[in-house]
Image (cartoon, coloured by chain):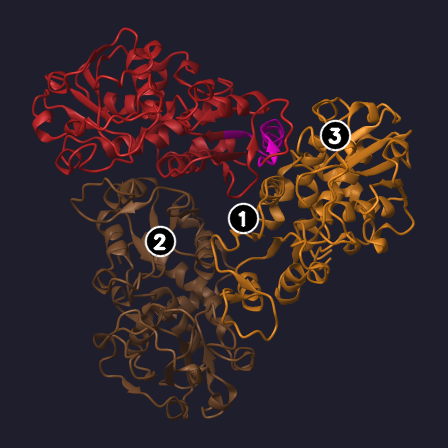
Chain colours: A red, B brown, C orange
Amino acid sequence: MKNFFSLNDILDIKKSISEIIDLKKAKNDKSQYINHRGKTIGLIFFNPSLRTRISTFRASKNLGLETFFINISENTWSLEFEDGKIMNASNVEHIKDAARVISQYCDIIGVRSFASLKNKKKDLSEHVLKSFIRYSKIPVFNMESSTAHPLQALSDIVTIKETSTKKTPKVLLTWAPHIKPLAHAVPNSFIRAMKKMNFDLTISNPKGYDLDESITEGVVVNNDQYDSFKNVDYVYAKNWSSYQNYGKVYRDFDSWTINSTKMNLTNNGKFMHCLPIRRNVVATDEVIDSSNSLILKQSENRIYSAQYIIKKLLENE
Amino acid sequence: MKNFFSLNDILDIKKSISEIIDLKKAKNDKSQYINHRGKTIGLIFFNPSLRTRISTFRASKNLGLETFFINISENTWSLEFEDGKIMNASNVEHIKDAARVISQYCDIIGVRSFASLKNKKKDLSEHVLKSFIRYSKIPVFNMESSTAHPLQALSDIVTIKETSTKKTPKVLLTWAPHIKPLAHAVPNSFIRAMKKMNFDLTISNPKGYDLDESITEGVVVNNDQYDSFKNVDYVYAKNWSSYQNYGKVYRDFDSWTINSTKMNLTNNGKFMHCLPIRRNVVATDEVIDSSNSLILKQSENRIYSAQYIIKKLLENE
Amino acid sequence: MKNFFSLNDILDIKKSISEIIDLKKAKNDKSQYINHRGKTIGLIFFNPSLRTRISTFRASKNLGLETFFINISENTWSLEFEDGKIMNASNVEHIKDAARVISQYCDIIGVRSFASLKNKKKDLSEHVLKSFIRYSKIPVFNMESSTAHPLQALSDIVTIKETSTKKTPKVLLTWAPHIKPLAHAVPNSFIRAMKKMNFDLTISNPKGYDLDESITEGVVVNNDQYDSFKNVDYVYAKNWSSYQNYGKVYRDFDSWTINSTKMNLTNNGKFMHCLPIRRNVVATDEVIDSSNSLILKQSENRIYSAQYIIKKLLENE
């Protein structure tokens, strides 16, 4: 791998998942440190982060790396992304220069940059991540971009593999309410992950909330949430804003909150969410805090997914 | 110790003080590093910090720890603390989830969260620190909370022990002017410290500024500042807002600034303050810069107090 | 060296440049680490930074140092610089106390503090850097102050030495347009550097933009930009605001943008800029991206300049 933009950069995902699980099992074996001590990783944030910031820090330290954080526009200059621009407005430095300079100072870069949800074409172009990849001389990985959050998806697969007794678990990705328009990165990557693993995926969302068809292709979309819960092994809850009517939110779906009544329709189903979760909006406390909730396992697995990807990139494997 | 919330978590304070002094003496002996190398400490700030931020960083590095800082609401999501809340307002993540996730990524957490000075009941409940302690699976220590600043108090005791020729020095805690309402954490912890050490403590403050009686119990409170300075060995200056009329400030006490005339009433008394200090408001330059001022020794001792507490927590001693 | 405020703190600049080039050549030799492992460096920013922040981080790590960043007024208290001030306004802590405290917690400090461009006398007094130097008990170095950016200038000399075939290259420092008033630190230090190296320097700027005469003394200033480009080996572009009419900007000089027509007048001249650069305002994309552009080499050399200075200061050489 030269860069890690999406799950498509992984050639054999089943092999990768198995290697991540091995990394986790060997977490107390410090010998993995040796190869990368003295290298430097730069973690660049255009948006807030808790899990990603700290799990990637921990992953980096597990590999012996020196780590710095850059919060763009707070610690440093605001960036221009348009080629050929006459830079007489607010942006002080062009990504072309910033990315090339940063890549002289470290050995690998992670970048987080959310969708604007205002300009669909620009968001889909992934101009921020793609610019870092284009101009950096070193490996770049995605810590959540406009359209993909592949480190989360890897952790989600590992979590299912660790808990499933079936080879082909029945998985439901269900839309859930929220108070703000959210991006499509997490559901996109989760769907790609389930398809690559050949898990039995269904999506449930209200009308008007269908995701990008090029991603959901081949997956049943059920607008009846109650019906969709029946007999599934895993319920992955996530809000997203409209994709067709890009970034818009329809206010009539409060009843889509995940609760115990719905969970009781499943096959003793596990509950999953990428966090942060708005409690009693996306899902009830009862569901989130039940023994069937896997949210902490998902977040713990973020360490090993990041560690695996960083290791592979540094070793150009 | 499982957690370090206040001085009450220390069983034998005199033994601890003596061990902190030993740590300081051995500061050039790097062998103390060995046990904790590879562990990770998370330092979480809801408020600004200079001394605490850097002294705890240095203490952590003295122990070989990897260190990350989180500035809540700046680097990450704003947190909800109310149980059972329908999270449809501005807070994005519940402390229950944030604390459990963070505690998966590191080995020990320090938290700073000042009093609001608006809601007495909430401040006294210490909901921020107590929530971190409740939900974290790893040790949590107090880097100044609503009602306590025990790392400062440990440094203050060490400073007195290092400079006092008496076994039972005569100590004055005196209120001093300020331009903003300040919290009670520092005086509370200082009083607890002096009582635990059996030092001869007096408090001097204007009427209306009496501290929490459950803490000052057994200590003489003198409203005559001049009288209180007579013959003391240590003068600890600190502003605080009203405790009874919670968070309020009375504007008639500018004459309480500590100056040389007052210091001359003491027994060649040493001057102490936790910093930051508003010069020529709390105390005059002459007092702060005199050879009897211990402010730098106090701040230097913050390294060893933090190092001691972190070490004890990691070793669960 | 006890402190590194400007190039004047370096006794033999030619020897230093040669040692920086040696450091760069030995970048894969980790033995330089050994002496300083376990020491701590504090990097203090009053202003944004990308190159300086990361290159100094990398330099510090190359020396085995523990590194912390402080963003003043964001992570910590705002600072007062006036002696004897009654501190009843917005600044919470006096530099006298902050600098002395910080210097107890680490072994060396770097400080960045730009000119205000509002108060010439105050800017020229360099009160921020000079206060840190005055009150710190440990070495302090300049990461760009009101009037000097010596780490940039060292990198610039190294870049010229690495690329020049002449012993005395012909160098042009040319003013270029910008949309905001900028400070004089970079041109000041560049001029000092060229003079110390005995390079053949000319300055070109519009009328009204003459720099501090005590610095430009002995250097030809040409108000005809086209004429100044003729036959030079290096073109160093930089905007600055008026020095006489302090901090003011005259809006009639858009034609001063560096373009290929001008570069074609040179002796196959190299293009230099300290970055960040406003593309197509300061210089055209064509110039910045040409094979004669040295901007990336300049920024890469920031690592080794910083590493050299930090090493010398820690070794008090």
Which residue has dot 3 on it?
Answer: C294
Q: Which residues are magenta?
A: A90-109
* Direction from residue A303 to residue A201 in the image, left or right: left
Q: Amino acid at mark 3?
A: Leu
Residue, x 80% and y 41% (percent of image)? C18
Which residue has dot 1 on it?
Answer: C67
Q: Which chain is disc 1 placed on? A: C
> Crowding at label 1, few (<14), some or many (≥20) Cα neighbours within 10 Å?
many
Q: Estimate the x, y position of residue A44 in percent, counting from the top left.
A: 49, 34
**Relative to residue C137, is residue A149 depicted above or below?**
above
* Direction from residue A18 to residue C186 in the image, left or right: right
* Direction from residue B85 to residue B302 in the image, left or right: right
> Toward the viewer: B250 or A277?
B250
Spatial CA distance of label 3 from label 2 is 45 Å
Q: Which label sits in the foreground, 3 or 1? A: 3
Which residue has dot 2 on it?
Answer: B110
Does the magenta segment cover residue A91?
yes
Secondary structure under tag 1 reads strand
Q: Is residue A20 visible?
A: no
Q: Estimate the x, y position of residue A24 in percent, counting from the top left.
A: 33, 29
> Toward the viewer: B229 or B42?
B229
